[in-house]
Image (cartoon, rainbow, N blue to C red):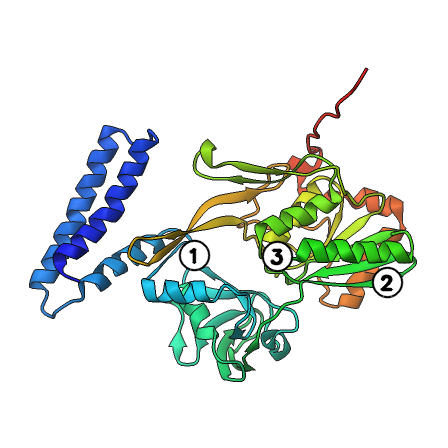
Amino acid sequence: MRRRDCVIFGVGLLVGGLVFEAAIGLADQSLVHNRYKKLNIFASVLSYIENDYVDPVDGRALVYGAIQGMVRRLDPYTVFIPPNLYKEMKAETSGEHGGPGLELTRKGKQVFVISPLPDSPAQRAGIKAGDEIVQIERKLLHKLSLFQIRRLLRGRPGSRLRLFIRRSGVQRARWFVIIREQIRVQSVYARHLGKGLYYAQIKSFQDRTERQLKAALRGFQQKASIRGLVLDLRNNPGGLFDQSVRVADLFLEQGPIVTAKGRTARRMEREMSHSKGTWKGFPIVILVNQGTASAAEIVSGALQDHRRALVLGTRSFGKGSVQTIIDLSDGSGLKMTIARYYTPLGRLIHGRGIQPDVINRSSSKSDLLRVAKRYLLNGGSYKKALGRGLGAKYRKKFVVKKKAKTTN
């Protein structure tokens, strides 16, 4: 790419933003002037480097590097993706790939496991939520984006992958050896617990999650009336936003489910529940832990705020932001955070997570189910514990319901 083309490309990105802001009335003259001054500095530095730097340079790489440096100053979920990687990413959206089955996040220069997918190679190898991945094969991760790290994790099913992992409370980091597999996740697993109690685990929110959960509930009802439900969202890394809304709507008759708030009022969206098809008349206990994130936190927070479910376990991960993917003119892409999620009572999910009503740090499924069943079978204890995790500010608040229509 010639220097002139690089400058035009960089200028195009920034000027495009200015034109958009002017069109919606957000940019005043002083703001435009300041932006152009910054653009002049960018063009000057690019010109000096291309003309006078001691070694020949790739102009396109310089522009892309500048953009990547810019988005790195934002959050870990906002990334610039060059054309070759963006094309590859779009080709991988089928939901199946060879890999270890890990959901990751970045905190500063450190990369942590949100959760291993259920029954994935990573889970079977012993990797846990909260583990820090220091190295993949010979690659240190502190300078890599999450997208680049995910590319390193993926590969041909059957191929070997080595991860160097540091775990809190363990003195020495160690290598984990994993054999990649084709990752296919069955979204919902359900079974009868006895005494009219039922268990449904949502492993991740995929395009058929709500449909599968509804089918499970109908199957329960055919056996006997539902006396209580355990909804297991532990180690659920999230997934499709619309499916989380639909799952929460299954159990809520009215009122808000989640609000996504962006930079301006124009960027605020609220999802509401509907009375049709609501499953009610029985208590619910939701199981959460550090690996419960994103879409799973939307469901947990909504049902907790409405006092529709008791949340049991440990504080969830706290990943509650909305990303959009923008196609750029040269074939590259920008994945950018545009909003954050708030629960019906206005609690921010991102960075805070969902605090359980009943804290239970056991990692044993049987232990958690025993406690959950005790609450489901004891109405007094269940009602007393509802909303306990909301904190003093929200504990006495209740979600405003839509007024029912009356007729004379």
Whether residue 389 appears in this view of the structure is no
Residue 391: which numbered mark, if any?
none
Q: Residue sitting at 17 percent across and 53 percent down?
A: 7
Residue ranking furthest to the top: 408
Residue 193: which numbered mark, if any?
2
Q: Mark 3 or mark 1, which has the lower sequence index?
A: 1
Task: Locate residue 34 relative to residue 131 in the image: left or right.
Answer: left
At numbered mark 3, what does the secondary structure look like: helix, strand or loop?
A: loop
Position of residue 398 relative to residue 382, above or below, is above
Task: Locate residue 383 relative to residue 80 in the image: left or right.
Answer: right
> Residue 367 falls in which quadrant of the image?
bottom right
Position of residue 35 relative to residue 203, above or below, is above
Q: Residue sitting at 61 percent across and 57 percent down?
A: 207
Residue at mark 3 to residue at mark 1: CA–CA distance: 25 Å
Q: 110 and 400: which one is in front?
A: 400
Q: Position of residue 136 (x, y in %)?
A: 44, 77
Position of residue 386 relative to residue 25, above or below, is below
> What residue is disc 1 on?
76
Q: Position of residue 247 (x, y in %)?
A: 69, 49
